[in-house]
Image (tube, helix red, strand yellow):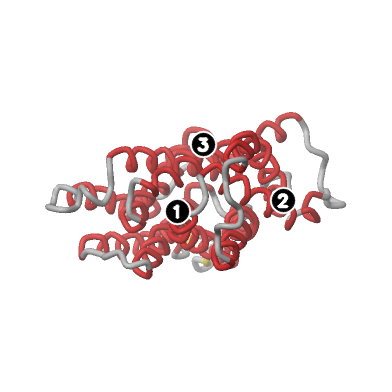
Amino acid sequence: MNPGPAVQSPTPWLAYACLALSTSLVGSYVGLSKLLVLTFPVFLLAWLRFGLAALLMLPWLRRGSGEAPLDGRHRRLLFLESFLGNFLFSICLLFGLQHSSAVVAGVILAGIPAAVALLSRLLLKETQSARVWTGIALGVSGIAMVALERQAPGAAAQSSWLGIALLLGAVLCEASYVVIGKKLTAQVSPKRISALINLWGLVLVTPLGLWQAAQFDFAAPSAQIWGLLLFYAAAASMVTVWLWMSGLRKVPAGQAGVFMVFLPVATGMVGLLMGESLSGLQALAYGLGLLGVLLATLPSRIKA
């Protein structure tokens, strides 16, 4: 019997949109957080972020009617998700931004897709197609471009090696966050994941946050800065996590990692608005990253 024509494989475009929007929002607050770290000490900033987000997400803590109770394994995964993806990632990122420009930081963070693909292969046993690996390679190539550009006169003054090392640590933390999140979405709802890992983040950072709060003048920040902090809390802990987990439910972790390229693109755009410059080499890196997303997400044809 004739098997019939090739048919189009289902493509989760809504999930893709959630992933792209999530990482774009993350990229925007990465750049904007440079303003916040000029006002708040790093641990106090993280503590305020988790605290505000915890209040916003109180209704999300409730277990859904069709959701199974958490077992010991998922509780451990939730802790690791928060420790690596919230606590340690925030520390590496915020301290790294203090020693790096937002534009350079954005291109360094383009290495996240490769780290996600490698970890998903090791821990989830996922296999990626040649086209997805090509898309990953296009995004990661931006890191090499920036490393070469740092040898140019004046480039080294923008970013220290300490800043680059911290940002690379943030890359590893974020890759772990994606892989662990893929495991969690099989049983826990995206909203509940967001609320629970935020609570763990609040618990982890509270001792350091209180230590810095005792020495901070809370009357000093302007109303604009407090508004930016509220946006940072809602974007970083609530909206972006919910969007990301919603998309991750339908997309393999390695493929979802390609969408991290929207993070450096958005970061770079915010950096430009803050007065930083974008070189031709960095612009090329962003273009390659976007081409990589296109390659990794175009629907493939399968035989019936």
Task: Name the one closer to the observer, 129 or 109.
Answer: 109
Q: Nearer the viewer, mark 2 or mark 3?
A: 2
Q: Are marks 2 and 3 in contact (CB under 8 Å)?
A: no
Residue tagged 3: 125
From the image, tell me which residue sits under label 1. Answer: 38
Q: Position of residue 251 (x, y in %)?
A: 56, 54
Dividing the image into 4 quarters, which one contains the C terminus?
bottom right
Quick one: label 1, few (<14), some, or many (20+) residues within 10 Å?
few
Residue 96 position in % (x across, y down): 39, 44
Secondary structure under the numbered disc 1 in the rendered image = loop
Residue at the (48%, 56%) spot, across then down: 33
The residues bearing labels 2 and 3 have C-alpha atoms spaced at a distance of 34 Å
The residue at which mark 2 appears reads as 54
Left or right relative to 136: residue 245: right
Q: Quadrant of residue 83?
A: top right
Choose top left, top right, bottom left or bottom right for residue 60.
Answer: bottom right
